[in-house]
């Protein structure tokens, strides 16, 4: 049997592919390479370049490769972009997910793991936020994820279909073995942007909003190492294969850091300061998001190994240095 990973050439998806292949799983990837890279994948993993909204392609992959589980990472993820282009996000995140889900149901693929987001909570009433908290997204991105969650719940009630929804908090870091990392151009993730600034790839780092009701006025987020997140998916897949009921899990550590605290961590790792510009708030940004992660610990027996902000930042910085060296060697070779 084979695991289909959609968006598997992207940042989180490629870490998942390495996690699965390290465990001896048969894996196939579907990615349109809009933000992903073939080089992020193990050489022996088949890659189909295409759209998850192409049901004929998805159905063919499922049939030819005897797919028994789908891990769905493909989608658009930039909150401000979703505010500017809500229809694009509802097409790419919601409509395409609906097509993928239909292909899965028609092919009797019974195990489905969905890459969701803490953005479905909006500004929670209490912190840390648990899975049963009200869902009040502040952006089309969050709403597009929540709509897919609702579809999965309804599908599971009507078909022999089990799912795990993993609601990510802020994902950061890179593979400790340096096989893959955040490689997208103009990425908006704070730690990625900060390490790029520290290494001179950006002229300055923008901080959006310093007047939030937090200790230092900047947003608070729960940062999770991408490798720990991939292992959470592996635990969810094992749980479903063992007959576990459909369930939703928060993926975080239960500790929040402010934007300014993260910047200080990057400065420590880099060994020097860098320009920071304080700007106005962005639309769609919640004030504070910190996970109540007790459920994933108790049900999946998930034990994170990289629960340390300085370690997360260190891996991200090491990956960025590696990427800069690769780009520099490429420029020299082509000169």
Image: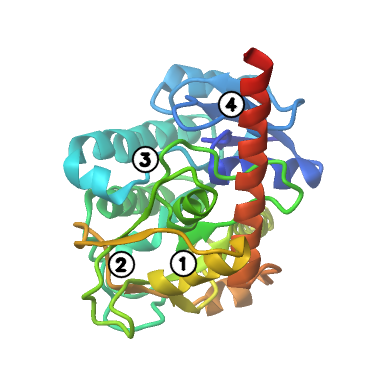
Which percent across, then down, holds residue 223? 50, 67
- The mark that comes first in sequence, 2 or 1, is 2
Q: Secondary structure at mark 3?
A: loop
Image location (x, y in percent) of residue 153: 38, 54
Q: Which residue is mark 4?
A: 62
Cα distance, mark 3 to mark 4?
Answer: 23 Å
Separation of marks 2 and 4 at Cα, in angstroms: 33 Å
Q: For mark 2, what is the residue? A: 121
Q: Mark 3 or 1 closer to N-term?
A: 3
Task: State how far apart marks 1 and 4 are (Cα).
Answer: 44 Å
Q: Closer to us: mark 2 or mark 4?
A: 2
Q: Is residue 273 visible?
A: yes
Q: Residue at x 43, y 33 (%)?
A: 100
Q: Secondary structure at mark 4?
A: helix
Assign a secondary structure to mark 1: helix
Distance from the alpha carbon under mark 2 to that under mark 1: 25 Å
Q: Is residue 110 visible?
A: no
Q: Residues within 10 Å of mark 3 (few under 14, many from 20)?
A: some
Which of these two is toward me, 141 or 315?
Answer: 315
Residue 27 location (% of width, % of height): 69, 34
Q: Nearer the viewer, mark 2 or mark 1?
A: 1
Q: Residue 103 occupies which quadrant of the picture?
A: top left
Residue located 41% across and 81% down the image: 128
Relative to residue 182, is residue 155 drawn left or right? left
Residue at the limit of the structure toward the top, as seen here: 334
Per the model, the C-alpha gap separating discs 3 and 2 is 18 Å
The image position of residue 243, as x and y in percent, is 64, 58
Q: Are marks 1 and 4 in contact (CB under 8 Å)?
A: no
Residue bearing the label numbered 1: 263
Asked if the residues shown at circle 3 and circle 4 are in contact, with their CB atoms under 8 angstroms apart, the answer is: no
Q: Which residue is mark 3?
A: 76
């Amino acid at each position: 049997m084979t695991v289909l990973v959609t968006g598997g050439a992207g940042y989180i998806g490629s870490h998942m592919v390495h996690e699965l292949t390290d465990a001896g799983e048969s894996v196939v990837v579907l990615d349109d390479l809009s933000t992903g890279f073939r080089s992020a994948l193990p050489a022996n993993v088949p890659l189909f370049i295409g759209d998850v909204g192409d049901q004929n392609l998805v159905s063919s992959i499922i049939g030819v490769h005897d797919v028994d589980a789908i891990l769905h990472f493909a989608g658009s993820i930039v909150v401000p972009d979703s505010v500017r282009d809500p229809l694009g996000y509802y097409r790419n995140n919601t409509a395409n997910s609906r097509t993928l889900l239909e292909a899965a149901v028609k092919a009797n693929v019974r195990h489905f793991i969905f890459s969701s987001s803490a953005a479905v909570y909006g500004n929670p009433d209490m912190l840390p936020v648990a899975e049963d908290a009200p869902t009040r997204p502040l952006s089309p991105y969050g709403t597009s994820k929540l709509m897919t969650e609702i579809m999965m719940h309804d599908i599971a009630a009507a078909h022999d279909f089990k799912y795990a929804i993993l609601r990510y908090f802020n994902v950061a870091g890179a593979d400790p073995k340096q096989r893959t990392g955040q490689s997208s151009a103009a990425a908006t993730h704070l730690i990625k942007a900060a390490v790029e600034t520290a290494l001179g790839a950006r002229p300055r780092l923008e901080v959006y909003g310093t007047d939030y009701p937090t200790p230092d006025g900047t947003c608070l987020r729960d940062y999770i190492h991408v490798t720990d997140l991939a292992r959470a998916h592996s635990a969810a897949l094992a749980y479903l294969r063992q007959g576990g009921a459909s369930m939703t899990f928060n993926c975080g550590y239960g500790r929040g850091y402010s934007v300014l605290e993260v910047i200080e961590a990057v400065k420590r790792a880099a060994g020097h300061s860098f320009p920071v510009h304080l700007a106005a708030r962005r639309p769609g940004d919640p004030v504070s998001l910190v996970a109540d992660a007790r459920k994933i610990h108790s049900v999946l027996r998930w034990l994170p190994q990289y629960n340390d902000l300085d370690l997360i930042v260190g891996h991200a910085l090491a990956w960025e240095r590696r990427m800069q060296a690769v780009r520099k060697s490429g420029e020299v070779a082509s000169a």
